[in-house]
């Protein structure tokens, strides 16, 4: 097991950078999730760590060793692919042993490792089947098995659960988490699913257009998003971002005036500055805390455990989530605890609070 | 909603009729004729025909020329299949490496397939022509005196190359299709699993290409047995001696040149038998064993 360090890492495919200026240290045994929208460079970053893409700029270190020019086989990492990439002409056992044989491991040692992995992943009954004769979930396990028998320095996962149905995805998610805890292997996991990211990560790395937007624990990222992009990407339903203006110490949104409690506004902002007011839908309370809006409800989504209310305020749409069973009136007042409000600069999107 | 279906019993047959008629007139009828003819013997003037049962077949098997043609065919088929498959595979692998050049490269390699076999035969005859061809001239520089008119080894090399030439494009196309069906992530997984390029080729590429390969082996063998008449006729005409007289060429020689129709028909039937056998092997053995 080893730490992974990325220093000013960049990748260009000819025109512009798909990944740029990535600085990240992944501690030994840590589970880091790279999350971001499609095309933001997650896979590219992961594949550079694996050695499947060349590095255009910067350095990759695994442990103390700089691996920029080291072959994938020599990096001592294992990767789980989105389509599993199982060898279709080999049985499950051969799939698991292939990498070990290639490394010249003794037959006895290979057998021990396969037996152990098969036990861990409950693959015992399938060892002599071809991948074709396995269900999606079983193939996923074989792909995991192929990674763990290697006992590598690090696991790299590229959206390994995206081909499974919703229910299986939840099960496999917690299995992967438990397995990683038990083995203590440094892991880098790529996903565009923010729920997967939140539940798996020790630390989240939010990527946008090839750059890191924020690094932090899932809770940090959720409660203190570093930018409007992160705020809208992490959390479902997404955080409301209302364009407001600073007017004599309060926020103006259309004809509504929001008086902020003292201390919430950072000093030094010019009068009339454009800001984004961030409010999590689930932070809404129906009791009046003194800080809130009158909204015109346009429609309601029933989730069973909660209700999602879509409304309009001052010409902006606003989404709030209330508990099940609460009455929804066509016009109603929703309030927010002051601590749940976030402010971002409208121009750069950077967080102010 | 109602689904429109043909509920008339006759209609499918009416629609099939033209195809069936063509098959009957151009394939079944002549095949039947040949089959019947193989049991007959005509006198040298074509005036009298007698039924001789399996006489033609017995005579063939006793005929050293025929046995030599069998052997020549085996040699020719295996060499041609090996050469055209090998070359097709190498070119397809090269294409995988240089995908960027795909367009002109593919076009260039498919081109010989479009050239009629006789033209390609003449082309090779010309290239290898001992007095005016460029290759004998180059070989002479290397100290080899090329003459496929006199040396049977040279003649065999010439017909094998000429026959392979056309098949290469066909094999190439199938290998390219087979290769592009192998997902890149398999090679990446294998690379991470410490398999170098050579090992990846033998443990991933080849096994996954095997179904394509077996299919092509059969297609190529059938081609060399049936479809190479024009190549032989345009290059060596079966010579020198009998050294490049393959079965299909002998059918022509004995039937149309020698006018020994009974024997020629019997040879056709045997040739047909071999091809049917190969096809059965293809469907029964190969298709079942190579699945994964
Ligand atoms: N081989 C390539 N050649 C050129 N551009 C590429 C190549 N691979 C990726 N890109 C570009 O790099 C960017 C990042 O791609 P990448 O595959 O890393 O995205 P991703 O975050 O993994 O997206 P997804 O969630 O859809 O998998 C994209 O804009 C993509 O078009
Ligand atoms: Mg990706």
Image (spheres, rainbow, N blue to C red):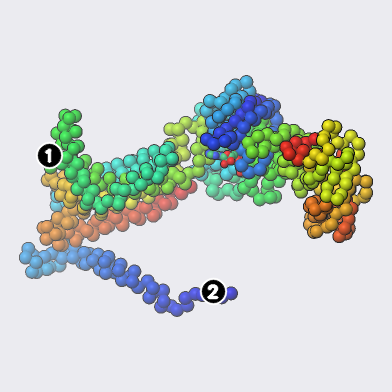
Residues at circles 1 and 2 in contact by the CB criterion of under 8 Å: no
**Which quarter of the figure is the N terminus of chain A placed in?**
top right
B72 lies left or right of A228: left
Q: Is residue B220 above or below residue B25?
A: above
Q: Mark 2 points at which residue?
A: B3
Q: Dividing the picture into quarters, in which one does residue B172 lie?
A: top left
Image position, residue A259 (x, y; %) = 90, 43
Q: Dividing the picture into quarters, in which one does residue A34 lie?
A: top right
Q: Which of A173 and A39 is in front in this view?
A: A39
Disc 1 sits on a residue from what chain? B
Image position, residue B254 (x, y; %) = 14, 57
**Ligand 1 is found in which quarter of the picture?**
top right
Q: Which of B288 and B161 is in front in this view?
A: B161
Instruction: Write the residue at 47% across / 31% down.
Output: B196
Disc 2 sits on a residue from what chain? B
A101 lies left or right of A293: left
Instruction: Write the residue at 76% across / 47% down.
Output: A238
Q: Which mark is residue A267?
A: none
Furthest residue to the left? B45
Q: Mark 1 points at which residue?
A: B131
Q: Dividing the picture into quarters, in which one does residue A218 lie?
A: top right
A107 lies left or right of B46: right
């Amino acid at each position: 097991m080893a730490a992974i360090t990325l220093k000013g890492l960049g990748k260009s495919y000819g025109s512009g950078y798909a990944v740029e200026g990535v600085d990240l240290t992944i501690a030994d045994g840590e589970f880091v999730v790279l999350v971001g929208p499609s095309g933001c460079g997650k896979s590219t970053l992961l594949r550079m760590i694996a050695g499947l893409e060349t590095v255009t700029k910067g350095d990759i270190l695994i442990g103390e060793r700089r691996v920029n020019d080291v072959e994938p086989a020599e990096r001592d990492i294992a990767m789980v692919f989105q389509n599993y990439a199982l060898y279709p002409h080999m049985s499950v056992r051969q799939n698991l042993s292939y990498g070990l044989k290639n490394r010249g491991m003794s037959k006895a040692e290979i057998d021990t490792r396969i037996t152990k992995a098969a036990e861990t992943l409950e693959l015992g009954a399938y060892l002599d089947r071809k991948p074709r004769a396995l269900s999606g979930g079983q193939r996923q396990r074989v792909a995991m098995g192929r990674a763990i028998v290697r006992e590598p320095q690090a696991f790299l996962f590229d959206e390994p659960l995206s081909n499974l149905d919703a229910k299986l995805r939840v099960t496999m998610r917690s299995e992967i988490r438990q397995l990683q805890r038990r083995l203590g292997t440094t892991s880098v996991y790529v996903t565009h699913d923010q729920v997967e990211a939140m539940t798996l990560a020790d630390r989240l790395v939010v990527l946008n257009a090839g750059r890191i937007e924020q690094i932090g624990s899932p809770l940090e990222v959720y409660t203190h998003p570093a930018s409007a992009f992160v705020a809208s990407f992490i959390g479902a339903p997404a955080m409301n971002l209302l364009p407001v203006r600073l007017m004599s110490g309060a926020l103006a949104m259309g004809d509504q005036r929001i008086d902020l409690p003292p201390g919430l506004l950072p000093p030094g902002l010019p009068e009339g500055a454009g800001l984004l007011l961030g409010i999590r839908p689930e932070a809404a309370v129906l009791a009046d805390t003194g800080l809130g809006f009158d909204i015109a409800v346009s429609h309601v989504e029933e989730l069973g455990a909660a209700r999602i209310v879509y409304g309009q305020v001052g010409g902006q749409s606003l989404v709030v989530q209330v508990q099940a069973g609460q009455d929804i009136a066509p016009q109603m007042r929703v309030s927010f605890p002051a601590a749940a409000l976030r402010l971002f600069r409208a121009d750069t999107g950077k967080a102010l609070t | 909603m109602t689904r429109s279906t043909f509920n008339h019993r006759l209609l499918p047959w009416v629609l099939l009729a033209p195809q069936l008629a063509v098959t009957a007139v151009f394939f079944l009828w002549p095949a039947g004729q040949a089959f019947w003819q193989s049991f007959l013997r005509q006198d040298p003037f074509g005036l009298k025909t007698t039924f001789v049962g399996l006489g033609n077949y017995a005579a063939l098997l006793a005929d050293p020329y025929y046995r030599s043609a069998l052997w020549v065919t085996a040699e020719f088929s295996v060499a041609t299949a090996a050469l055209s498959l090998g070359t097709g595979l190498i070119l397809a692998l090269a294409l995988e490496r240089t995908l960027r050049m795909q367009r002109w490269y593919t076009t260039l390699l498919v081109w010989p397939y479009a050239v009629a076999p006789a033209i390609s035969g003449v082309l090779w005859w010309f290239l290898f022509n001992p007095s005016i061809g460029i290759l004998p001239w180059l070989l002479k520089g290397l100290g080899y005196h090329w003459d496929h008119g006199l040396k049977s080894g040279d003649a065999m090399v010439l017909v094998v190359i000429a026959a392979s030439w056309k098949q290469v494009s066909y094999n190439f196309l199938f290998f390219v299709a087979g290769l592009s069906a192998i997902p890149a992530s398999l090679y990446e997984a294998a690379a991470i699993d410490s398999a170098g390029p050579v090992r990846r080729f033998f443990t991933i590429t080849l096994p996954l290409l095997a179904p394509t390969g077996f299919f092509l082996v059969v297609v190529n063998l059938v081609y060399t047995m049936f479809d190479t008449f024009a190549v032989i006729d345009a290059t060596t005409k079966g010579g020198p001696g009998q050294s490049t007289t393959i079965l299909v060429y002998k059918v022509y020689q004995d039937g149309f040149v020698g006018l020994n129709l009974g024997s020629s028909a019997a040879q056709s039937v045997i040739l047909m038998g071999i091809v049917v056998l190969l096809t059965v092997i293809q469907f029964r053995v190969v298709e079942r064993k190579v699945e994964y």
